[in-house]
Image (spheres, coloured by chain):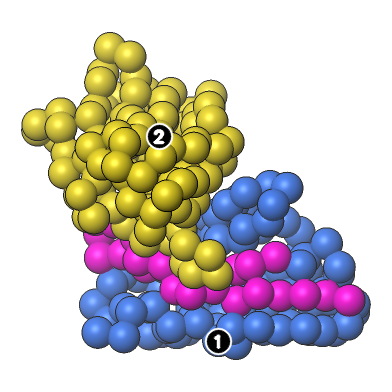
Chain colours: A yellow, B blue
Amino acid sequence: AQSVAQPEDQVNVAEGNPLTVKCTYSVSGNPYLFWYVQYPNRGLQFLLKYITGDNLVKGSYGFEAEFNKSQTSFHLKKPSALVSDSALYFCAVRFPYNTDKLIFGTGTRLQVFP
Amino acid sequence: DAGVIQSPRHEVTEMGQEVTLRCKPISGHNSLFWYRQTMMRGLELLIYFNNNVPIDDSGMPEDRFSAKMPNASFSTLKIQPSEPRDSAVYFCASNANKNNEQFFGPGTRLTVL
């Protein structure tokens, strides 16, 4: 079945430390992958996407993600976490390939402690 | 650009009442999506339109739910009759084409008593 998995419900990290939020996917064909962030009582905001090209994608607020085809992963990373990064993060994959439809993961809550 | 606009932001109603949620997509976007978010089920796609035509409504829970897009700048999601299990945050999103990201509205928090 086509899907996106975010194996961690919550990630805790100290401010200033690097952070990683994991995402793996299972779709046929070349995946189009997205990361979104949701702050409390807000809609989802786009962070970055991988369509094609360089496997390392840079996005908003200093976030980046690396597409790894062999591991079918698209982990979100940031070199130095901020308390203001605390939010709910969603990975998504476009499927079916030729449509606008996104399949979202279950979300990972990132908590950055001062 | 005002972004995706949703109204109302909050709706409290009693079981059995009709509820209508409204969405104005970003001007020039040709796809519109309705999502529902709950703690139990996460973020679910209910239906999406392309050029005002419903493309995939496989996520609509049951016949009590209906959605329309009469023109490129307006869509409604209607629940009739509403039930307590419909309580959720409903998001509308739009995008310009399938390679682009979706832009989400602020959501409508629906509480059915």
Q: Is residue B6 found left or right of A73 in the rendered image?
A: right
State which chain disc 2 sits on.
Answer: A
Q: Is residue A59 magenta?
A: no
Q: Quadrant of the N terminus of chain B?
A: bottom left
Please report the residue visible at 58 percent of the width from the left and 52 percent of the height from the top: B43
Considering depth in this image, is A9 or A68 the residue closer to the camera?
A: A9
Tell me if residue B101 comes above or below residue B66 in the rendering: above
User: Do circles 2 and 1 both sit on a common chain?
Assistant: no
Q: Is residue B92 found left or right of A27 in the rendered image?
A: right
Please report the residue visible at 41 percent of the width from the left and 29 percent of the height from the top: A22
Q: Is residue B102 magenta?
A: yes
Which residue type carries mark 2? Val
Which residue sits furthest left? A53
> What residue did someone put label 1 on?
B7
- Dot 1: what SS? strand
Q: Which mark is residue A77?
A: none
- Residue A100 at x, y = what percent? 36, 52
Tell me if residue B44 comes above or below residue A76 in the rendering: below
Range of magenta residues:
B88-113
Tell me if residue A105 comes above or below residue B97 in the rendering: above
Which residue type carries mark 1? Ser
Which residue sits furthest front? A114
> What residue did someone put label 2 on?
A21
Considering depth in this image, is B65 or B107 the residue closer to the camera?
A: B107
Please indicate, yes or no, whether residue B72 appears anywhere in the rendered image. no
Please indicate, yes or no, whether residue B75 appears anywhere in the rendered image. yes
Q: Quadrant of the C terminus of chain B?
A: bottom right
- Residue B15 at x, y = what percent? 90, 77
Q: Quadrant of residue B18?
A: bottom right
Q: CA distance from mark 2 to mark 1?
A: 33 Å
